[in-house]
Amino acid sequence: MVDGYAQAAFRIGPHGLSAANPPLFLAEIGTFFNQDTSRAARLIARIADAARAVPEQPLALKGEVLHDPAVCLDDATMETYQSRHGEQRRERYRDLIDRKVLPLDQYARLFNLVRGTGLPLVLSVYDRAGADFAATEGASALKIASANITNIPLIRHVAGLGLPMLIDTGRSDLEEVARAVRTAQHAGAPGILVEHSPDGHPAPPANHNLRLLRTYAQAFELPVGLSDHHTGEEMMHMAIALGVHLIEKGITDDPDALEQDAAHALDLAALPASLRRLHACWTALGHGFRDKRVGITGTVATSQRQGLVAARDLLAGDRLDMDNVRFAWPARGVGAEHWDLVAGWTVRTKVAAGTPVGWADIHALAKT
């Protein structure tokens, strides 16, 4: 509980986000399609195919509502991005936005396709009109992008729409994250997830600071997520080990493109295999203890526990000591773990050398 705020169980569509469930994967198409809605439709269809191919791994489709170029000033600000091969490009930021914005009616057609797949829809919103539109279009959750973590009016408005919220932290310090979280809580957000977004596009391992996931979880007592900006999959696997509840990663059908955010996006063709690896990582976490009553699967080697064996012929009346017994696999008689109990016990009947010493072969009556 934070500042008296009790969060209900966090859900995105049918998927509960908790330690008991695999982390939800957000397959983000963002604006990779550059106003080509036919391409966007193909991305949606193939992501849905991947979700059906790996049903054990929860997946939601991630998009955005970027409908008004005025969210970016029409000035000389430049944006720099690169391909996964290191080639860089500089582009006037407003020109980049102009080639990515999409009218709301075209977004509506795309979101209708998403509803047809049955996948939950999570949308980044950048203004109040876009947020209202996303809510009416049936979004399961809304995201505040890292660039808007200081936009208190927008956070307050989105929180009041009654949908779960993702707050991307980007380059924010802990105080800025806390202010955004408190604002959303006080404005009535029914659920909040704090998303860690490492520096860099792509982000090298040294920029990831993945321990921040635990810091956020402990500081805010809220579920946490990772917006993966790495060129590979290792950071997603690390995040699972750290207890993340959600992983967001871009999905593109042109991974070699020199385009914004493409350098750290996952190749669409690799999505099913990636989903299987993510689920395997989560499954491997298991529990915090080993329950020997639960059967194990796969090829299992013979138990290598050792037991007592006569080192020489043991005769009735001999007492067990380290000179006349040894230990060997497997434990056919008295287990080695019982040695402190049976040391000094008396042999009842002869036990031939090399033969396991069983409980029936010894007794404690003559022990002194």
Image (cartoon, rainbow, N blue to C red):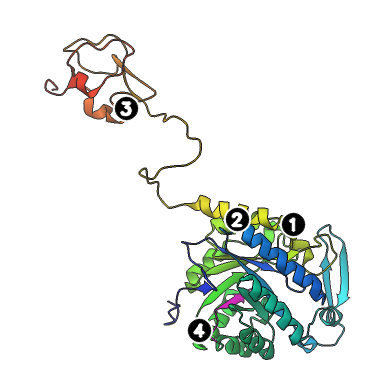
Mark 1: secondary structure: helix
Residue 200: image quadrant is bottom right
Residue 333: image quadrant is top left
Camera-near label (3 vs 2) is 2
8 above or below 349?
below
Amino acid type at image mark 2: Leu
Mark 3: secondary structure: helix
80 above or below 263?
below
> Spatial distance from mark 1 to mark 3, Cα to Cα?
54 Å
Sooner in the amino-acid sequence: mark 3 or mark 2: 2
Q: Is residue 109 left or right of residue 236?
A: right
Q: Is residue 12 left or right of residue 251?
A: left
Sooner in the amino-acid sequence: mark 2 or mark 1: 1
Instruction: Identify the residue at the far left of this view.
Output: 365
Residue located beneath label 4 in the image: 185
In-front residue for pair 215/58: 58
